[in-house]
Image (cartoon, helix red, strand yellow):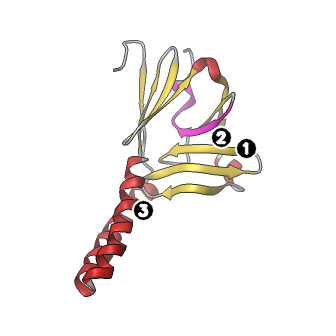
Amino acid sequence: MVSDNSKIIKYHWSSFCLLLTLGLTLLFVFIIYKMIHSNPIPGCAISSVIIGLMVYTILQCPLYIINSRKQISIKLIGKTININKDDILFIRKIDKVELNSAYRAGGSGGYFGYTGKFKSLEIGTFYMYATEFYNLQLIVTKDKKYMVSCSFDKFENE
């Protein structure tokens, strides 16, 4: 439930992220179809693994952010990540070039968003929930770092 003074910030999908998601989904469906029809027993086993990974990735897809007085909530399809504002040390804008040394330690690199655990020389370990590389914001708490894609002014004056 969203209170009256909360801001809902919807994620904007980059063209690359959208096309990658659509393209890979079609490719995976085609591969699953071919595997099941060419070799039913091993095809079903391998298809089950592919489908399981697809479902997990879909559940990690970011939908929107709720910015309230007490917390920032990152709403994914499968769960909500709540960050208490008392735990936030700072929020700052990230330029795309700051991610040049970043790599995925686990998660998705564009399929249903850029999600999961990432590491970078400049930033350290962080959890990304983004659907584009513009308007990236780093939320640093006492024990974790989160990166989301939305404009900074959505977090101001709260």
Residue that numbered label 3 is attached to: 20
Residue 57 in the image: above or below residue 92? below
Q: Nearer the viewer, residue 96 or 144?
A: 144
**Residue extent of the magenta highlight:** 143-154
Mark 1 or 2 closer to N-term? 2
Q: Residues within 10 Å of mark 1 (few under 14, many from 20)?
A: some
Give x and y (percent) for residue 101: 72, 56
Kindly identify the amino acid type of the residue bearing the numbered disc 1: Ile
Of the two numbered discs 1 and 2 in the rendering, the one whose residue sits closer to the viewer:
1
Residue that numbered label 2 is attached to: 94
Q: Quadrant of residue 26?
A: bottom left
Q: Nearer the viewer, residue 17 or 39?
A: 39
**Farthest residue toward the right?**
121
Tell me the tag on residue 123: 1
Give x and y (percent) for residue 5: 42, 12
Kindly identify the amino acid type of the residue bearing the numbered disc 3: Leu
Alpha-carbon distance for marks 1 and 2? 10 Å
Give x and y (percent) for residue 116: 54, 49
